[in-house]
Image: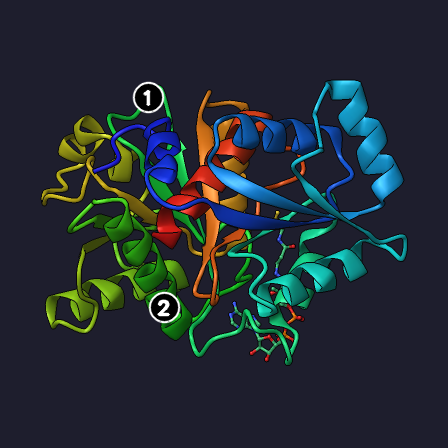
Amino acid sequence: MICNLNELIQKAKSGARQTVAVAAAEDEHLLKALQAAMQEEIVRLLLIGNQEKITLIAHAIGFDLSKVEVVDNREGEAISARIAVDKVKRGEADIMMKGFLPTSDFLKAVLDKDSVLRTDKLLSHVAFFQSPYYHKILCVTDVAMNIAPDLDAKVLIIHNAVEACHRLGIENPKVAIAAAVEKVNPKMEATVHAAMLKEMNRRGQLKGCIVDGPFAIDIAVNRDAARHKGIEGEVAGDCDVILAPDIEAGNMFYKALNFLGGAVSAAVVMGASVPIVLTSRSDDERSKLLSIALAASICR
Ligand code: COD
């Protein structure tokens, strides 16, 4: 079981090396993370983008590209994303990664009707955090892809997060359904969804995990807060997964953990035919490296 995100590096190294197709690779922070991934021997790289810019940046940071395939594209980042999808289609890449382009442009290429990445599953973003204030790794979903999931989508988002946890050896993850309060209030949709998701879990409609909520975040991650508010059960204060009510709440929590909470993160999009690394352009190099290691670990 992965107890610390740094262990992802070792796990990623444990099998055959996967190839990552990186769409719009012309960015210094990204290339530094990719250089570290090469040095750690986690993956092989296939970079797509403006070759002149990629070469210039690589030279400036001392990244030797002699063992890296670079596909030159001067027609813009959205085309780079399409080329990356094509590389997966041809079997030349096992993992796809977003480089320096807007998330929605990247995702549109992933979701294109002819894209080989599409499956019959919902695609959702699954982020793992290592916070100095929490006793284990914490998964938060969906902070970057599904904008305002309805109940059906939330079931599928939980399913993807639980699958990611299982692949990291977290066997029966405890899932907290986040809301602003812990009582069901018909005027707050997140609390109503939480009650339904909890019941669906009890009746065997949501398997492989223990679901509880609605929980305010303090109750989800802090046993004292839960006890103080009289909330019992095995999920409160010890959750493995937090389901965010929507992308705004989730994304703010994600950025607050990274920029104010001293956390590092690793994130992947689940549900596609191959793992997709979808980090924010502002994520630090370590988080980008750990995300690559997470995707490679999940491939196994
Ligand atoms: N999983 C599977 N298929 C999907 C999904 C999904 N999550 N979302 C859409 N689709 C399919 C639809 O069924 C349809 O066939 C096709 O894709 C297009 O659907 P639209 O028209 O609803 O989707 P788009 O292209 O307008 O938008 C999809 C995005 C993922 C781009 C959109 O949801 C989005 O912009 N999400 C937020 C991304 C973002 O800005 N994140 C910022 C955080 S850093």
What amino acid type is highlighted by mark number 1? Tyr
Tell me the tag on residue 4. none
Q: Which residue lies at the image location 19% right of the left edge and 36% below the top edge?
A: 238
Residue 19 in the image: x percent, y percent? Answer: 54, 49
Q: Please, is residue 138 above or below residue 210 in the view?
A: above
The foreground one among 269 and 65 is 65
Q: Which residue lies at the image location 71% right of the left edge and 33% below the top edge?
A: 66
- Measure the C-alpha gap from mark 1 to mark 2: 29 Å
Q: Which residue lies at the image location 39% right of the left edge and 53% below the top edge?
A: 299
How crowded pointer 2 is (Cα within 10 Å; few <14, some 14-19, many 20+) is rated as: some
Residue 75 in the image: x percent, y percent? Answer: 89, 57
| Marks 1 and 2, the one that precedes in the sequence | 1
Residue placed furthest toward the front: 66
In the drawing, does residue 168 fall left or right of residue 90? left
Tell me the SS state at disc 2: helix
Q: Which residue matches tag 1?
A: 133
Q: Which residue matches tag 2?
A: 156
In this rendering, which labeled residue sits more in front, label 1 or label 2?
A: 2
The foreground one among 286 and 138 is 286
In the drawing, does residue 145 fall left or right of residue 26? left
Residue 297 in the image: x percent, y percent? Answer: 37, 45
Q: Please, is residue 251 above or below residue 221 in the view?
A: below
